[in-house]
């Protein structure tokens, strides 16, 4: 697909078929995500890939049974893949303590960073992943992990300092998927977004 069409037609998918996605496909999607820029080429984004029974365990941790009956996106649970993007703040602190970055002062600790580049880089990578998924003819939803994060992390053995950005469900999209609550909001006009020459 042409890049402009890819960007224009990407939408979040909230209803999936359970049809599995092959490991090779998943690796190629993550390979594309990993080509995103990263500050100081720190490359501090990691991906926990859940398939098969691991996906059911993810939902057991993060969507309590009592909330499931009223959960609006029932077919979100059919997604065959969940990818958890984690970012590593300490990798950035260590990289910026190296001689070529030392003058920035950012090697002093996470609190020295006015903008957390680990979040920026991880977000760039997630965006590339979403576009790669769309380009592959699949659907994806980036969503928040509101419940059970600690239980999930403990079960998966995630190091304490790693920050979870959210979760990405991936799979074949159900056609005519109901749109999200926010989808009816109008798209911001380009003139509201651009502040020409000054705010
Ligand atoms: C940081 C972030 C968090 C989001 N969290 C959720 C979420 O928890 N649940 C959900 O259904 N959609 C979530 N979304 C999807 C947005 O609602 C969606 O991107 C927005 O309405 C625009 O729709 P589109 O991406 O289909 O164009 C999230 C998107 C972003 C960027």
Image (spheres, grey):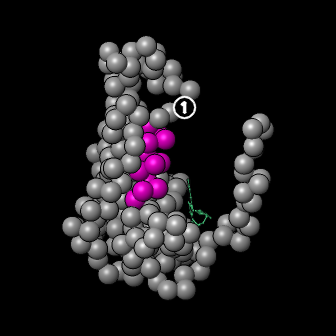
Q: Quadrant of residue 55?
A: bottom left
Q: What's drawn in magenta, residue-wise? A: 118-129
State yes or no: Cβ of the residue under disc 1 lies below 8 Å from any atom of ligand 1: no
Q: Kindly identify the residue that appears in the image at 22 percent across and 67 percent down.
A: 23
Residue 8's x, y, as percent?
Answer: 56, 69
Q: How crowded is mark 1: few (under 14 residues within 10 Å), some or many (20 or more)?
A: few
Q: In this view, does 55 lie to the left or right of 13?
A: left
**Count of all numbered marks drawn on residues in the image:** 1
Quadrant housing the N terminus: bottom left
- Majority SS type along the magenta span: helix
Q: Kindly identify the residue that appears in the image at 24 percent across and 72 percent down.
A: 22
Q: In which quarter of the image is residue 31?
A: bottom left
Question: Compared with residue 51, is residue 157 higher up or lower down, i.e. above or below?
Answer: above
Quadrant housing the C terminus: top right
Considering every residue shown, the one lying at the far bottom of the view is: 175
Is residue 154 within the magenta segment?
Answer: no
Question: Compared with residue 149, is residue 49 higher up or lower down, i.e. above or below?
Answer: below
Considering every residue shown, the one lying at the far front of the view is: 197
Q: Could you say which is closer to the camera, residue 96 or residue 70?
A: 96
| Residue 15 visible from this viewpoint | yes
Q: Kindly identify the residue that appears in the image at 34 percent across and 30 percent down.
A: 91
Residue 106's x, y, as percent?
Answer: 45, 20
Identify the element where label 1 is drawn. Answer: loop
Q: What residue is pinned by disc 1?
A: 115
Q: Is residue 66 left or right of residue 133?
A: right
For ligand 1, which image quadrant applies? bottom right
Is residue 121 within the magenta segment?
Answer: yes
Q: In this view, does 41 lie to the left or right of 118?
A: left
Residue 136's x, y, as percent?
Answer: 36, 72
Question: Compared with residue 84, is residue 135 higher up or lower down, i.e. above or below?
Answer: below
């Amino acid at each position: 697909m042409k890049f402009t069409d890819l960007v224009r037609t990407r939408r979040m998918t909230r209803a999936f078929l359970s049809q599995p996605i092959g490991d090779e496909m998943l690796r190629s999607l993550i390979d594309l995500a990993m080509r995103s820029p990263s500050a100081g080429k720190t490359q501090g984004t990691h991906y926990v890939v859940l398939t098969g029974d691991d996906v059911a365990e993810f939902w057991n941790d993060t969507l309590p049974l009592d909330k499931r009956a009223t959960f609006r996106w029932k077919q979100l649970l059919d997604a065959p893949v969940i990818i958890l993007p984690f970012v590593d703040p300490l990798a950035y602190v260590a990289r910026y303590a190296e001689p070529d970055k030392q003058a920035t002062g950012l090697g002093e600790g996470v609190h020295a960073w006015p903008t957390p580049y680990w979040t920026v880089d991880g977000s760039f990578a997630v965006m590339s992943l979403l576009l790669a998924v769309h380009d592959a003819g699949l659907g994806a939803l980036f969503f928040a992990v509101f419940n059970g994060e600690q239980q999930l992390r403990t079960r998966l053995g995630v190091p304490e300092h790693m920050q979870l950005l959210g979760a990405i469900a991936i799979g074949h999209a159900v056609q005519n998927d109901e749109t999200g609550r926010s989808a009816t909001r109008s798209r911001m006009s380009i003139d509201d977004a651009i502040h020409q020459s000054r705010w």
